[in-house]
Amino acid sequence: MPVSERIALVINELIEELHAVEGRAGMLRETIANLQKLSPAPRLPFVDQPATAAPSYQPPRYVGMTVANAAISFIRDAGKPQKTRTIADALADGGIESTNTYRAVYNSLRAREDVIMDEHNSTWGLKEWHEQ
């Protein structure tokens, strides 16, 4: 099994575990709040806050993708040309790990034929946008 698939399996298992723990934490908060109603015990700060549903966790979007494919996906989703720094920041936030994400994005896109760099505006766009 490829490493990216194993990582995805581990992420899914961790998400399930996180949801279980968050659900248990909500039940514990509710029990503490109910007990505090019965006794003049000191109130704990987190109990005074209403219990909320467990946040929906989304694994980082670009994990398992190449820098070039992740960058193209980001540009396509943005729907308009993007600067290298904007792409690099989005990829880093989305799970792409690199010692120099900016350089990795620039070099990866420079080598692709389906991407066009507008040197006047320093932005990257998709060749398919110009063919329509």
Image (cartoon, grey):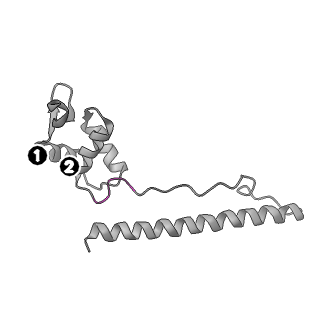
Residue identifier under label 2: 68
* Quadrant (top left/top right/bottom left/bottom right) for the N terminus: bottom left
Picture quadrant where residue 97 is located: bottom left
Above or below, 118 relative to 93: above
User: Where residue 109 sits: x, y (%)?
Assistant: 16, 44
Which residue: 74% across, 57% down? Answer: 47
User: Where residue 132 sits: x, y (%)?
Assistant: 17, 30
Q: Secondary structure at mark 1?
A: loop
The residue under label 1 is which amino acid type? Ala
Q: Is residue 55 left or right of residue 103?
A: right
Do the numbered discs 2 and 1 sit on residues whose CB atoms are within 8 Å?
A: yes
Taking the magenta stretch, the answer to whether it contains residue 95 is no
Picture quadrant where residue 26 is located: bottom right
Secondary structure that dominates the magenta span: loop
Which residue: 20% across, 33% down? Answer: 129
Q: Distance between the Cα atoms at labels 2 and 1?
A: 9 Å
Dot 1 crowding, Cα within 10 Å, few <14, some 14–19, many 20+? few
Count of numbered tags: 2
User: Where residue 121 sits: x, y (%)?
Assistant: 21, 26
Picture quadrant where residue 29 is located: bottom right
Residue identifier under label 1: 111
Q: Secondary structure at mark 2?
A: helix
Using the image, tell me which numbered label, if any, was put on residue 40. Answer: none
Q: Which stretch did the figure color magenta? A: 60-64
The residue under label 2 is which amino acid type? Ala
Q: Is residue 15 left or right of residue 39?
A: left
Above or below, 32 relative to 92: below
